[in-house]
Image (cartoon, rainbow, N blue to C red):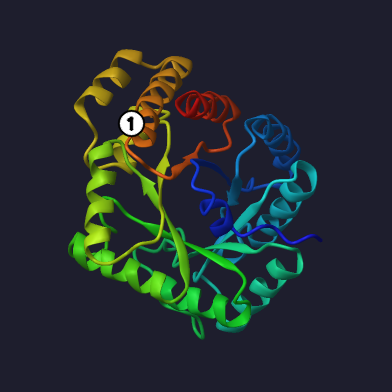
C-alpha cells in the first residue's frame, strides 16, 4: 500500500491544518455505521485523521482494520495511536512493523491510561513504562515514521506541576517526537499559557490544540476540572435536550477555534467522538476562519 505522507511535511506547509480523531467501535456490528460517518466526515477534507487504540486486545486488531479502512475507502492520511498498555516490547515491535507494512508513516505514541478496573498505570511484564520509551522504539525500528505525542494544557493528572510535566513532553520530543497534540480544554488561555511555557523550556515542535464539543454538563465536568462558568450556564440552560446541548457544545468550540486560529495556532485537532454533525459544523468554522 502506498505510504502516507509524514505529518511533519503537512505542518511544514505553514498553513492551518485540520485533523479529526476516530475511535473503533467496540463491536464489529458498529463498523458499517463508522463507514457512513467516515464518508460524511470525508466531506471536510481533513489533512489527517487519527484512530484510537484499544489496549490489552480490547480493540487492538479492530484499530488496525479501521485504519486500513479509512485509508482505503476515504484516502485519508491516517495516524494510528499506539500505547504501552498491555503489551511486551516484542508485541509493540510487531505492531509497529504491521503499521509500517500497511503504509502508515505516522503514529501517535502514548503511554496510555490504566485499563478498566485499575486505578493506576502498571508496567506490563517486558513492556515499556513511558511514552518517551515508545517514541525511541518506533524511531529505532523505522526512522521515517513521524511520531506525534500528547500534551496536557492543565498538566497530566499524575504530574506534580506543569513544569515537570512539560519536561517529560520535552523528553518525548528529544527522543524523536515531531509534534504535540493537546488534550481537550475549554479555556483558550490555558492553551496559550501551555505553549508559552513550552517555548520557555526550549520545546519548538508544533503544538496542535485539541478541541472537543461537549455533549453534556456531566461529561464536561468529568473531562475538565476548570469548566468556564459561562459554558456551564449555557449547558444548564439547554437542559435535557440532547440536540440543544450539542448545539451549545458546537457553538462554544466554534468560538474557541476562531480565537485559536486568529492568534496563531497551527490548526485544530477535533475530538468529535465519531459524531459527523459536530465534525462538519466545526470544519466549516475552520474554513470560514481561514477565508
Q: Between 117 and 237, which is closer to the camera in this rendering? A: 237
**From the viewer's perspective, is residue 187 above or below residue 112?**
above
Task: Indicate the position of residue 13 as horizontal and vertical percent values.
Answer: 54, 49
Q: Quadrant of the N terminus?
A: bottom right
Image quadrant in which you'd find residue 133: bottom left
Q: Is residue 195 left or right of residue 111?
A: left
**From the viewer's perspective, is residue 259 above or below residue 242?**
below
Image quadrant in which you'd find residue 74: top right
Looking at the image, the residue that sits furthest to the bottom is 126
Residue beneath label 1, please?
259
Image quadrant in which you'd find residue 6: bottom right
Q: Under tag 1, what secondary structure?
A: helix
Task: Indicate the position of residue 110 as horizontal and vertical percent values.
Answer: 46, 64
**From the viewer's perspective, is residue 283 above or below residue 237?**
below
Q: How many marks?
A: 1
One can see residue 224 in this view: yes
Q: Is residue 171 left or right of residue 154?
A: right
Q: Residue at x 40, y 69 (%)?
A: 173
Task: Indicate the position of residue 162 as horizontal and vertical percent values.
Answer: 21, 60
One can see residue 53 in this view: no
Q: Residue at x 27, y 64 (%)?
A: 166
Amino acid at each position: 500500500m502506498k505510504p502516507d505522507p509524514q505529518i511533519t511535511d503537512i505542518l511544514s506547509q505553514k498553513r492551518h491544518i485540520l485533523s479529526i480523531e476516530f475511535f473503533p467501535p467496540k463491536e464489529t456490528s458498529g463498523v458499517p455505521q463508522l463507514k457512513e460517518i467516515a464518508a460524511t466526515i470525508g466531506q471536510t477534507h481533513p489533512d489527517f485523521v487519527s484512530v484510537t487504540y484499544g489496549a490489552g486486545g480490547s480493540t487492538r486488531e479492530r484499530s488496525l482494520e479501521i485504519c486500513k479502512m479509512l485509508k482505503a475507502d476515504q484516502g485519508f492520511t491516517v495516524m494510528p495511536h499506539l500505547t504501552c498498555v498491555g503489551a511486551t516490547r516484542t508485541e509493540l515491535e510487531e505492531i509497529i512493523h504491521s503499521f509500517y507494512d500497511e503504509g502508515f508513516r505516522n503514529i501517535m505514541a502514548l503511554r496510555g491510561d490504566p485499563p478498566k478496573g485499575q486505578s493506576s498505570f502498571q508496567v506490563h511484564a517486558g513492556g515499556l513504562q513511558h511514552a518517551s520509551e515508545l517514541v525511541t522504539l518506533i524511531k529505532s525500528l523505522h526512522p521515517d515514521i513521524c511520531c506525534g505525542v500528547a500534551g496536557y494544557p492543565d498538566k497530566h493528572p499524575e504530574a506534580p506541576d506543569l513544569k515537570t510535566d512539560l519536561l517529560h513532553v520535552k523528553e518525548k520530543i528529544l527522543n524523536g517526537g515531531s509534534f504535540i497534540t493537546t488534550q481537550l480544554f475549554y479555556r483558550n488561555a490555558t492553551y496559550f499559557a501551555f505553549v508559552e511555557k513550552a517555548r520557555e523550556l526550549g520545546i519548538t515542535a508544533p503544538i496542535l490544540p485539541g478541541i472537543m464539543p461537549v455533549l453534556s454538563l456531566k461529561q464536561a465536568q468529568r473531562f475538565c476540572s476548570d469548566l468556564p462558568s459561562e459554558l456551564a450556564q449555557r449547558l444548564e440552560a439547554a437542559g435535557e435536550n440532547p440536540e440543544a446541548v450539542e448545539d451549545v457544545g458546537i457553538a462554544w468550540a466554534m468560538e474557541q477555534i476562531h480565537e485559536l486560529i486568529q492568534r496563531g495556532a497551527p490548526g485544530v485537532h477535533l475530538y468529535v467522538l465519531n459524531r459527523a454533525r459536530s465534525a462538519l459544523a466545526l470544519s466549516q468554522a475552520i474554513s470560514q476562519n481561514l477565508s
